[in-house]
Image (cartoon, rainbow, N blue to C red):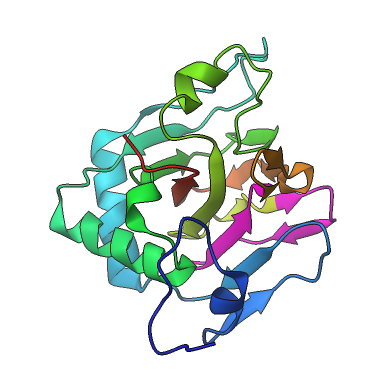
Amino acid sequence: MDLSSPPVGIDADPLWISGQPGVQRVPSREIALFIRRAFLDPDECAGLIARIETDRRPSTIADANGDGAFRTSETCDLDMADPFVMAIDRKLAAFAGIDPAHGEPIQGQRYAAGQEFKPHTDFFDPKGVDFAKYCSVAGNRTWTLMVYLDEPAAGGATRFPRIGKTVQPETGKLLAWNNRLSPGVYNPASLHHGMKVRGGVKHVITKWYRERPWG
């Protein structure tokens, strides 16, 4: 494969991702899960944290399950007209080899001590009551790219229980994984838990890509 320039497709290319310097692929037949340390530099992380702190609000979930403590973080919808955010967005798309038109706006999350996001998948359940609301235009989520912007004093790891993998927060570290196995077939091994922060604060950004162009 030509690694001099990224492919531009509707889905991520695992061969392109794994061929980039510093990328680790987690050994698993069930999920394509990649880790890249220092994907964002400290200044990029600090700039994103400042924006999240300015515009955060309580996080929500689709298809409410009756558990008021299921997702207790705060969320920030980052301004995609902001040149700083746009540069991060281009960097994420180039890493994955996905056409940026398929990307949702970047979302930031803030977890204070005691906050978590219990085990969940990023794809929307086709049988869920809100499936049409969230997926009628752009389709379901195909890939997730998440970057830790800082390290809490304790806790805050991301656990993939189906494959027994836990990833510790580290400033600038990126995780990327597939949420579907093929068109219309979604990946149960992508179940993950934003584990409870035990001390300090954790900030992350998340970028989701869709089956069809966003919006």
Residue 123, position as x, y percentages in the image: 61, 36
Q: Residue at x 15, y 47 (%)?
A: 81
Name above or below for residue 6 compared with residue 75: below
Residue 100, position as x, y percentages in the image: 34, 56
Quarter where residue 63 is shown: top right
Decide if residue 102 is on the left or right side of residue 126.
left
Residue 199, position as x, y percentages in the image: 58, 47
Decide if residue 84 is on the left or right side of residue 158.
left
Q: Which residue is drawn at 67% across and 63% down?
A: 33
As rendered, which of 44 and 84 lies closer to the eye? 84
Name above or below for residue 125 compared with residue 132: below
Name above or below for residue 193 compared with residue 172: above
Quarter where residue 43 is shown: bottom left
Decide if residue 28 is on the left or right side of residue 177.
right
The magenta-colored residue range is 159-180
Name above or below for residue 57 compared with residue 33: above
As rendered, which of 184 and 119 lies closer to the eye? 184
